[in-house]
Amino acid sequence: MQGGRVLLRGIFVTGTDTNVGKTLVSAALMRRYRQLAVRYWKPIQTGIEQDNDTAEVERLSACTADRVLQAGVRLPRRVSPHLAAKLTGSPIDIESLVTIANSQTGAWIVEGAGGLLVPLTEQVLLIDLIGRLQLPLMPVLIVARSGLGTINHTLMTIEVLTRRALPIAGIVMVGPRNDLARENRTAIEHYGGIPVLGELPVLSPLTPEALGEWTDEHLDRDGHLMEWLR
């Protein structure tokens, strides 16, 4: 810890929106860099009675149980973390998450909840937690949709991170691959100045084998993220 901040090493996965594909991309990163013995952590999840992103990453990445950290805030109701906490009477303790992070070593894939400006408490947004957990050794990877509207949402996400001086590792686009998706990628890279490191199509069925095949062939082919995970 330095100056009151945790110096985790790895990648923080955020999204331009909720349900954009952060968990899929997190699982793909675990698969892509399995030789580096990376581990996965989702500090905050709501709607735990319906979805368990930690279990899904373990399943899709085909990693061993010791590669995922179960600790963190787990709340019912698929709503914003601050609202889930209010409805359950369980305020989110940011310092407890920092303490968990302080107890860890090695390289990590850390998955956020929703987008950057999702409120966690009355005073703290997700981007504030990123600031506590990541500088300077954990850049942010943006997960964006491939379809209509993604240019605006992705460029806004880039601008918010840039204003906070938070480093950006790259972008992964998720969704159908078609002419619109190709044009969107070109526009995002041109106007945002951030490289797209992969385009994850719709996988049906969504199996560890299908995700692994795509990952091994198409995700971060040049090893751009390697420097953050060694």
Image (spheres, rainbow, N blue to C red):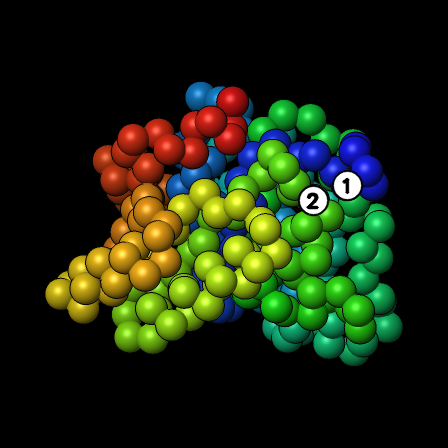
**How far across and down, in percent of the image, does residue 222 sit?**
29, 31
Quadrant of the rendered image containing residue 82: bottom right
Instruction: Pick whichever of labels 2 and 1 is earlier in the sequence.
Output: 1
Is residue 116 found left or right of 122 in the rendered image?
left
Q: CA distance from mark 2 to mark 1?
A: 7 Å
The residue indicated by pointer 1 is 5
Between residue 93 and residue 228, name the one nearer to us: 228
**How far across and down, in percent of the image, does residue 149 sit?**
34, 75
Quadrant of the rendered image containing residue 173: bottom left
Above or below residue 156? Residue 64 is above
Asked if the residues shown at circle 2 and circle 1 are in contact, with their CB atoms under 8 angstroms apart, the answer is: yes
Between residue 160 and residue 19, name the one nearer to us: 160
Under mark 2, the amino acid is: Leu
- The answer to whether residue 71 is visible is yes
Is residue 94 found left or right of 171 in the rendered image?
right
At horizontal 60% and vertical 34% (from top left) the residue drawn is 137
At horizontal 40% and vertical 42% (from top left) the residue drawn is 28
**How far across and down, in percent of the image, does residue 10 sit?**
56, 35
Under mark 1, the amino acid is: Arg
Above or below residue 159? Residue 39 is above
The residue indicated by pointer 2 is 133
Which quadrant, please, contains the N terminus? top right
